[in-house]
Amino acid sequence: MLVKILIAFVIAIFAAAFRFGVKPTSSGGKLTLKLILLNAGGWILLFLLVPDTGHPPPALIALALFWLVNCVLIPAGVAGLWNGYKSKEENTRFLSLAGVYLGLNVVVLFLIPLFWLIVNRTIPTES
């Protein structure tokens, strides 16, 4: 439960920063903002509304679908950021905040599960 509250808190901080503090100026930045808000809504739906009881837990199925959607969503957001950076139209604050948000998503959705799979794999040994 603490992890759910922590993730919801981080998402709320980023959403507030994007809503009130930092605005995109380029078309790539506006696309990235839409994708980030879609991602944040997915996190909130996943952790606050999907129950994690049952066999298999609905949260596990929802997380797998969320992971698949983010396989497309995160690279599209990075491409929009890169387009805004390359054309020098986007402000630095939005680029840095959106880059940190997308980077945290990559870490949580891809690197931590990969690390967990590598560390927890079982290697059969002959006795």
Image: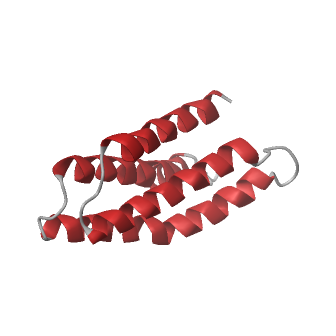
Q: Which one is in front, 19 or 41?
A: 19
- Give the vertical position of 93 relative to 29 (above or below): above
Percent x, y of residue 2: 63, 27
Which colouring convention does the figure follow? Answer: secondary structure
Q: Residue furthest right?
A: 54
Percent x, y of residue 85: 17, 64
Dividing the picture into quarters, in which one does residue 78 lie? Answer: bottom left
For residue 127, say whether it is visible: no
Dividing the picture into quarters, in which one does residue 76 lie? Answer: bottom left
Percent x, y of residue 70: 51, 64
Q: Residue furthest top?
A: 2
Q: Residue at x 56, y 68 (%)?
A: 69
| Residue 45 falls left or right of residue 54 | left
For residue 94, say whether it is visible: yes
Q: Which one is in front, 101 or 58?
A: 101
| Residue 59 falls left or right of residue 77 | right
| Residue 73 falls left or right of residue 43 | left
- Give the vertical position of 78 relative to 11 (above or below): below
The total of numbered circles placed on residues is 0
| Residue 27 falls left or right of residue 92 | right
Q: Which one is in front, 29 or 2?
A: 29
Q: Residue at x 62, y 54 (%)?
A: 124
The quadrant the N terminus occupies is: top right
Percent x, y of residue 118: 50, 52
Q: Residue at x 74, y 46 (%)?
A: 49
Q: Residue at x 62, y 46 (%)?
A: 44
- Give the vertical position of 76 relative to 62 (above or below): below
